[in-house]
Amino acid sequence: MMQIYGVDVDAKGRCVHYHLQVDIVALKCGQCQKYYACYQCHDALEKHPFAAVSKDDSAPVLCGNCRQTLTFDQYQMGQCPFCRHAFNPRCRLHQTIYFK
Ligand SMILES: [Zn+2]
Ligand SMILES: [Zn+2]
Ligand SMILES: [Zn+2]
């Protein structure tokens, strides 16, 4: 099973910063290639700032509920195409941090 990194991450990938029922998405850093619960967790635990990944990456997002990797387009659908768990629509506010 793919590991989700972060501060106080629970079984579904929620962290100390984002812990609503819908906050289950983990995002891959383009530099260390680890899936993090959020960029704040990443920057607290790594020595480099979170590096955005290309929207064309084959697996930029990981669903914390079913641990399937998703493409950017699948992530944009607002829910996981594998387990149907809803994603937090407010994540879009941070899209420029996570994707390029
Ligand atoms: Zn990194
Ligand atoms: Zn976090
Ligand atoms: Zn899922």
Image: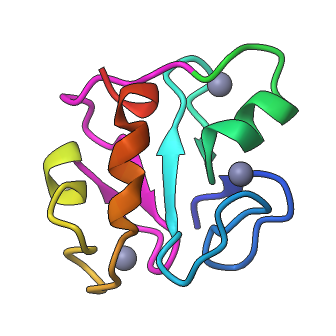
Q: Is residue 56 one of those drawn in magenta?
A: yes
**Residue at horizontal 25 percent and vertical 74 percent from the top:** 79
Q: Is residue 98 one of those drawn in magenta?
A: no
Position of the N terminus by quadrant: bottom right
Q: Position of residue 33 (x, y in %)?
A: 56, 30
Position of the C terminus by quadrant: top left
The image shows residue 78, relative to residue 95, as above or below, that is: below
Q: Is residue 27 left or right of residue 57?
A: right
- Colour mapping used in the image: rainbow
The image shows residue 48, relative to residue 74, as above or below, that is: above
Res. 47 image quadrant: top right
Q: Position of residue 20 (x, y in %)?
A: 59, 77
Q: Position of residue 50 (x, y in %)?
A: 61, 23
Res. 66 image quadrant: bottom left
**Residue at horizontal 27 percent and vertical 74 percent from the top:** 80
The image shows residue 41, relative to residue 97, as above or below, that is: below
Counting every numbered tag in the picture gives 0
Q: Is residue 46 left or right of residue 25?
A: right
**Residue at horizontal 49 percent and vertical 45 percent from the top:** 27
Q: Is residue 1 left or right of residue 30?
A: right
The span shown in magenta is 51-71
Q: Is residue 9 left or right of residue 84?
A: right
Characterize the magenta stretch by its predominant secondary structure: loop
**Residue at horizontal 36 percent and vertical 37 percent from the top:** 95
Q: Position of residue 39 (x, y in %)?
A: 63, 37
Nearer to us in this view, 54 or 17: 17
The image shows residue 73, relative to residue 88, as above or below, that is: above
